[in-house]
Image (tube, rainbow, N blue to C red):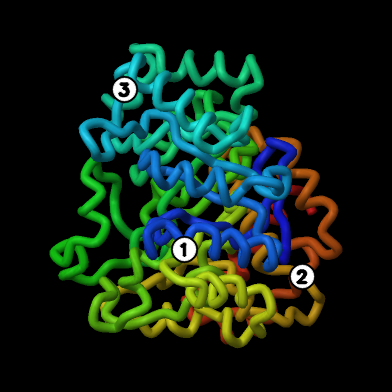
Amino acid sequence: MNYRELGSTGLKVSEIALGCEGMTEENYGMCRKLFDLAEESGINYFDLYSSDPDLRSAIGNALKGRREKFIIQSHLCSVWKDGQYKRSRELTEVKAAFEESLRLLQTDFIDVGMIHYCDALSDWDEIIRNGVLDYARELKASGKIRHIGLSSHNPQVALKAVESSSIEVLMFSVNPCYDLQPASEDVEDLWADENYASDLVNMNPEREKLYETCQRLGVGITVMKCFGGGDLLSAEMSPAGAALTVNQCIAYALSRPAVSCVLAGAHSVEQLREAAAYESAPESERDYAVALSSFPKISWKGHCMYCSHCQPCPVKIDIASVTKFLNLAKAGGSSNIPETVREHYRVLEHHAGECIQCGACEKRCPFGVSIRENMREASKVFGL
């Protein structure tokens, strides 16, 4: 299992992580099975968005004796009321639900306290206004949570939260279909058929800016909906009109800036085993570029997907890394490049200024990227 830094938190998380969708199956018996396989596979991070008290109890029992082996991302504002889940911003309910979750999970602290499901700017304002964010800060100061996060499907809301320096972790929906959709306060717009009825070209710029801003500011992204609820794995269900594999979906998400892990929702041991097998899969099975370039409804023409099909470079430039650092610099304003971006670029073995403009890379690129122009621009921006 490979491990990645979770932004600037200091936590190292398995790049394949565990969602909680399937844990209620077999009368919650699936929960222990999934945690057993997670431990065996080296998965050390999981998400708990559900407020179901029986699920929280099942997870608490599954963690008994091995709490230190897992990093918990659990949600504030997800409450259980009248026998069902509810998202709440009512501070009394939020506090009671959090204290109950500690008791049911049989732990003294949560590693990442995730403010739950904020898809509207007005909702983010309410989180600030009614004291939810202040409560999260109090929990962090007391050690009951170690880091503050936010879950969202809306890049506008997520970017506002990230730029406010209020959160350290962002849980966000990342896959090659949703990444083309504009910001919306209705999560169902991400998979609505009518939003894929006409040709879509290139990543939504607000989403691209969000990922690059998270990278620049040290906010780690934990990915939800990597498989689009399973739709992307089926040609009939996929908004793109063609299927991707599990490995292709995971590889795409992990190649986005700031992404630390993919939360794989599993309804069986076999499904989690398939996701964990990504770690040993050959590059040919992870390669998403050819599949994306052939989608019938979607085009990424002219947009670098960091797939490295442009390699090898005759002068050994890591073209994808150079392009990623160039995009990070542009996202922050090339006149004010963060020192971390500049230094990460500087320590590359070869720089854009070494490009001999041969064009071999452009002939290989599935997306028609103007790589030579990017190299000229990167050389100018970084001075190397």
N-terminal of the two: label 2 or label 3? 3
- Choose mark 2 or mark 3, whichever is in front: 3
- Residue at the disc numbered 3: 89
Q: Residues within 10 Å of mark 2 (few under 14, many from 20)?
A: many
Position of 276 relative to 343 (above/below): below
> In percent of the image, x 48 and y 55: which residue is there?
19
> In percent of the image, x 25 and y 76: which residue is there?
237
Say whether marks 2 and 3 touch (CB < 8 Å): no
Is residue 236 visible in the rendered image? The answer is yes
- Residue at the disc numbered 2: 317
The quadrant the C terminus occupies is bottom right
Q: Residues within 10 Å of mark 3 (few under 14, many from 20)?
A: many
**Residues under labels 2 and 3: Cα distance?**
50 Å
**Residues under labels 2 and 1: Cα distance?**
47 Å
- Choose mark 1 or mark 3, whichever is in front: 1
N-terminal of the two: label 1 or label 3? 1
State the image quarter where residue 282 is shown: bottom right
Q: Please indicate whether residue 311 sits to the left or right of residue 95 in the image.
A: right
N-terminal of the two: label 2 or label 1? 1
Q: Between residues 191 and 25, which one lies in front from this camera angle?
A: 25
Q: Amino acid at mark 2?
A: Ile
Find numbered disc 3 in the image and state the secondary structure of the residue it sits on.
Answer: loop
Position of 100 relative to 252 (above/below): above
